Image: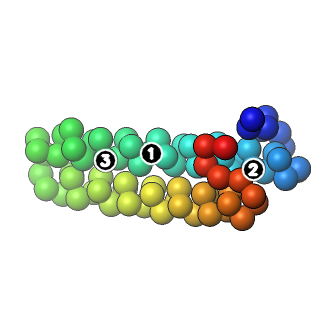
Amino acid sequence: CMPKRGKGGSERGRIALIHALAHIEFAAIDLAFDAAGRFGGRFPRGFTDDWMQVGGDEAMHFALLDRRLRNLGSHYGA
C-alpha cells in the first residue's frame, strides 16, 4: 500500500512524493508520444521530431525517479 504524501520529512513521505512525480512523468511520456503519433502526419516534420524529443526527455526523467525509488527500497507501481 502506497503511503499518503506528507511534507516529505519521513522516508515514507519522500517515497510517496517521488512516486507521485514519477507518475506525472509517466503520463507525460504517454502524452508526448500520443501527440507525435496522432497528429504527426498533419503537421510539418518538426512537430513530430519535437514531440519525440519531449517523450525521450520525459522518459529520462521517469528513469531517474524510478532509480531513486529503487535506491530507497521501493519501485514505481508499489
Residue 8 position, x and y percent, is 82, 48
Q: Which residue is mark 1?
A: 28
User: Amino acid type of disc 2?
Assistant: Ile
**Callout count:** 3
Residue 61 position, x and y percent, is 52, 59
Q: Which residue is mark 2?
A: 15
Residue 53 position, x and y percent, is 33, 60
Which of the marked residues, 3 or 2, is nearer the chain's N terminus? 2
Which of the marked residues, 2 or 1, is nearer the chain's N terminus? 2
Q: Say how the picture is coloured.
A: rainbow
**Secondary element at tag 1:** helix
**Secondary element at tag 2:** helix
Q: Which residue is found at the position 65% from the left and 52% from the top?
A: 75
User: Amino acid type of disc 1?
Assistant: Ala
Q: Which residue is mark 3?
A: 33
Q: Is residue 21 visible?
A: no
Q: Are marks 3 and 1 in contact (CB under 8 Å)?
A: no
Residue 30 to residue 53: above or below: above
Q: Which residue is found at the position 41% from the left and 48% from the top?
A: 29
The image quadrant that residue 67 belongs to is bottom right
Q: Are marks 3 and 2 in contact (CB under 8 Å)?
A: no
User: Amino acid type of disc 3?
Assistant: Phe
Q: Which residue is found at the position 29% from the left and 52% from the top?
A: 51
Q: Which residue is found at the position 44% from the left and 45% from the top?
A: 28
Q: CA distance from mark 3 to mark 1?
A: 9 Å
Quarter of the image for the C terminus: give it. top right
User: Callout 3 environment at 10 Å: few (<14), some (14 to 19), or many (20+)?
Assistant: some
